[in-house]
Image (tube, rainbow, N blue to C red):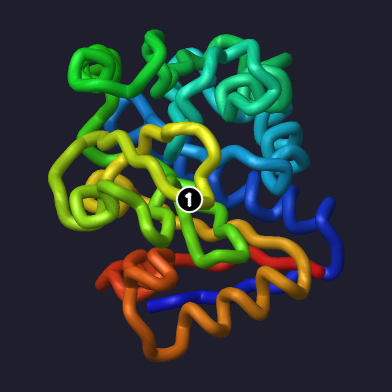
Amino acid sequence: MLDRKSFADRDTLAAELAEAVASRINEAIERDGIASVAVSGGSTPARFFAVLGKRKDIAWEKVLVTLVDERWVDELSKRSNANLVNTKMLQGPAATARFIPLYSGGEEPDAEALARTTEALKPLPQTFAAVVLGMGNDGHTASFFPGGDALEDALNGEGPVVAIRAPGAGEPRITFTLSRLLATDGLYLHIEGDEKAETLEKALADGPVEDMPVRAVLRAERPMTVYWCP
């Protein structure tokens, strides 16, 4: 149930992905009066964020925006995914959307911090309008990292969020669980460059999920669309 779309350049990809996500948002608002989206951080989605945030055909005041995962750092940090979303997407028309961060303060994502984040996430509908994932060259997506100390819980627990630490993750992280991310009207994987295309091919081949956790998403019994460009 994997649909793969390839584009000539990054601007075209950003525009087409924004069109798809905007359509999901508008459908959810028409159906439920509210819509929520979960997006990923890193450098890849910046163009997509900028294009989506400029859409004037979305009732942004009815939209809740959150993150697929987050580094456990303050929102003013350049390492913060929230910082990227706030500066690249939630400007102009999208400034009226409500942003719900995953980072909730404190030195570590301990039990109290996770409880604060879980409470903050309660306004989210049970089903996202859209979830946009990224993928690392090590085969991680969200914060489902190879060698993660809470990978089993992240992939098989109810969540909605778990704290995770892994050799390739840098800071401690917080991530939505797989089951929560799969509860979405539209599921997208946004990757760019030949190296990411090669990583995807490896992930689609046989092999343990623990080695390339993105396989857990790719093997899930639900439709997903890959957006890729060189």
Percent position of residue 153, x then y? 19, 49
The answer to which quarter of the image holds residue 208 is bottom left
Residue at 53% in and 60% down: 189
Residue at 36% in and 38% down: 175
Task: Identify the element where label 1 is drawn.
Answer: loop
Percent position of residue 50, x then y? 74, 32
Say which of 23 and 72 sits in front: 72
Residue 56 shows in this picture: no
**Residue 106 to residue 23: above or below:** above
Residue furthest toward the front? 167
Say which of 148 and 186 sits in front: 148
Residue at 70% in and 16% down: 91
- Residue beneath disc 1: 167
Say which of 13 and 110 sits in front: 110
Percent position of residue 15, x then y? 74, 49
The answer to which quarter of the image holds residue 174 is top left
Percent position of residue 176, x then y? 32, 40
For this view, does 80 lie left or right of residue 69? right
Residue at 70% in and 22% down: 78
**Looking at the picture, which amino acid does disc 1 mark?**
Pro
Residue 163 shows in this picture: yes
For this view, does 30 lie left or right of residue 96? left
